[in-house]
């Protein structure tokens, strides 16, 4: 593309609502387009660039009692629809919302965590170069670590 521009804004907020309860919220607007070119129409949206995206992640860690060290987390990630190519065809990558979760337990030097990604098994596609890439369906990852 001869010349392209991207203007936008991103807002990230991180905070602790109560002791042990953390939240991260993010939102972004991106205006990405062809600004000058001999081949593609000026104003064409750049492929793969969503206008809007956002996420929220929250986790709570029990800090006292028998369950001290137990952590629960839940998050959502939203991606607006995107153009699939230049010049802009009618075909677009659809918007999606992905939900993730985690549960972890840590005591002394031990830590065990189970992450669940794409809980609703949403069909998600992204662009990589000129290829359409399906993203991971519902998946789980179990990890354990020991610090010494």
Image (cartoon, helix red, strand yellow):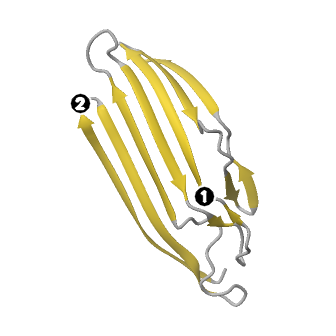
Q: How many marks?
A: 2
In x, y percent, where is residue 26? 40, 53
Q: Nearer the viewer, residue 3 or 44?
A: 44
> Disc 2 versus disc 1: distance between alpha carbons?
35 Å
Quadrant into which the C terminus falls: top left
SS at circle 1: loop
Q: Residues within 10 Å of mark 2 (few under 14, many from 20)?
A: few
Earlier-in-chain disc, 2 versus 1: 2
Q: Which residue is mark 2?
A: 19
Q: Name the spot of residue 110 as percent of width and height, x first.
A: 43, 14
The picture quadrant where one finds residue 142 is top right
Q: Badges 2 and 1: C-beta atoms under 8 Å apart? A: no
Closer to us: 100 or 109: 100
- Residue 92 vs 26, above or below: the answer is below
Residue located farthest toward the left when viewing the structure as drawn: 19
The answer to which of 1 and 82 lies nearer the viewer is: 82
Who's the residue at 61% across and 28% down the image?
A: 140
Q: Which residue is mark 1?
A: 95
Q: Which mark is residue 38?
A: none
Q: Position of residue 29 (x, y in %)?
A: 46, 66
Does residue 26 appear left or right of residue 114 in this picture? left
């Amino acid at each position: 593309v001869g010349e392209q521009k991207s203007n936008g804004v991103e807002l990230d907020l991180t905070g602790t609502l109560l002791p042990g309860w953390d939240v991260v919220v993010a939102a972004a607007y991106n205006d990405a387009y062809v600004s000058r070119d001999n081949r593609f129409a000026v104003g064409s949206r750049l492929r793969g660039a969503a206008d809007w995206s956002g996420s929220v992640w929250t986790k709570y860690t029990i800090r006292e009692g028998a369950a001290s060290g137990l952590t629960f987390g839940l998050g959502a990630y939203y991606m607006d629809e995107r153009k699939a190519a230049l010049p802009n065809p009618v075909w677009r990558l659809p918007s999606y919302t992905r939900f993730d979760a985690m549960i972890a337990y840590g005591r002394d030097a031990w830590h065990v965590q189970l992450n669940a990604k794409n809980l609703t098994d949403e069909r998600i596609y992204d662009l990589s170069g000129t290829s359409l890439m399906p993203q991971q369906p519902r998946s789980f990852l179990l990890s354990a670590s020991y610090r010494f």
